[in-house]
Image: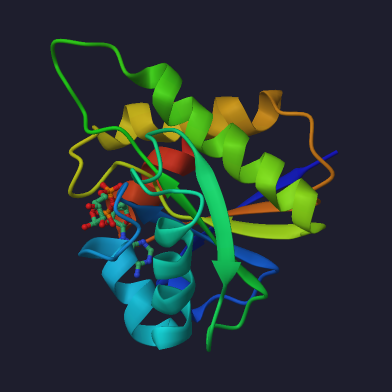
Amino acid sequence: MTAITLVKGDITRQSADAIVNAANSSLLGGGGVDGAIHRRGGPAILEECRALRASRYGKGLRTGRAVATTAGELDARWVIHTVGPRFSPQEDRSELLASCYRESLRVADELGARTVAFPAVSAGIYGWPIDDAARIAVETVRATETAVEEVRFVLFDERAYEAFAAQLP
Ligand code: AR6
């Protein structure tokens, strides 16, 4: 049974086995959570991302997939980078967003992570409406078979926190 917990705050200040990054397919950094994780985690994360680009992910990491690196100086063992879809009003990309959570948990299981902290993937720069992003996140984690004991959603602001809280009993 996986416990779902909510925290308001900065994900880079969390202590967990794995911290999930809302990355982009380049794996080479960006703004939002991605920028914050690389800033606070230090250069070891980018170094490993570069190595992944040079080996397995020459064309980048596909949307909906996930891959782990060191967490550098963060208080975690791993960062799991996942690439959320950009929100589109024309096309339903929910399945790709759900895939980010499923794939991140699959990678977490491979690593043996028991506590995993997630941001609200796609709900910032990628424009996903927060209520819908929260619904997909919580529904997908609930429906995923995993040995992870705690999935902690770390929400940056009150609005995002409320959206996730509305999905829990
Ligand atoms: N801790 C927790 N949540 C945060 C933090 C933080 N330190 N900073 C922002 N958020 P975003 P995306 C929230 O934009 O939408 C990057 O450039 C934020 O308020 O980080 O998936 C990547 O390289 C929002 O609710 O990720 C990609 O190019 C949520 O985290 C692109 O942005 C996700 O916002 C990915 O966009």
Which of the image's four quarters has the C terminus? top right
Q: Position of residue 135 (x, y in %)?
A: 45, 27
Q: Is residue 10 left or right of residue 112?
A: left
Query: Taking 10 as reference, is 107 above or below it?
Result: above
Q: Position of residue 3 (x, y in %)?
A: 75, 46
Which colour assignment does the render follow?
Answer: rainbow
Residue at horizontal 56%, vertical 67%? 69
Residue at horizontal 49%, vertical 27%? 98
Q: Nearer the viewer, residue 119 or 113?
A: 113
Q: Quadrant of residue 152?
A: bottom right
Q: Position of residue 35 (x, y in %)?
A: 27, 71
Residue at horizontal 30%, vertical 41%? 122
Which of the image's four quarters has the N terminus? top right
Residue at horizontal 20%, vertical 64%? 31
Q: Quadrant of residue 16?
A: bottom right
Q: Position of residue 36 (x, y in %)?
A: 32, 74
Q: Is residue 115 left or right of residue 20?
A: right
Q: In which quadrant of this rendering is ligand 1 seen?
A: bottom left
Query: Taking 142 as reference, is 23 above or below it?
Result: below
Query: Taking 80 as reference, is 45 above or below it?
Result: below
Q: Is residue 56 visible?
A: yes
Q: Quadrant of residue 139?
A: top right
Q: Nearer the viewer, residue 114 or 64?
A: 64
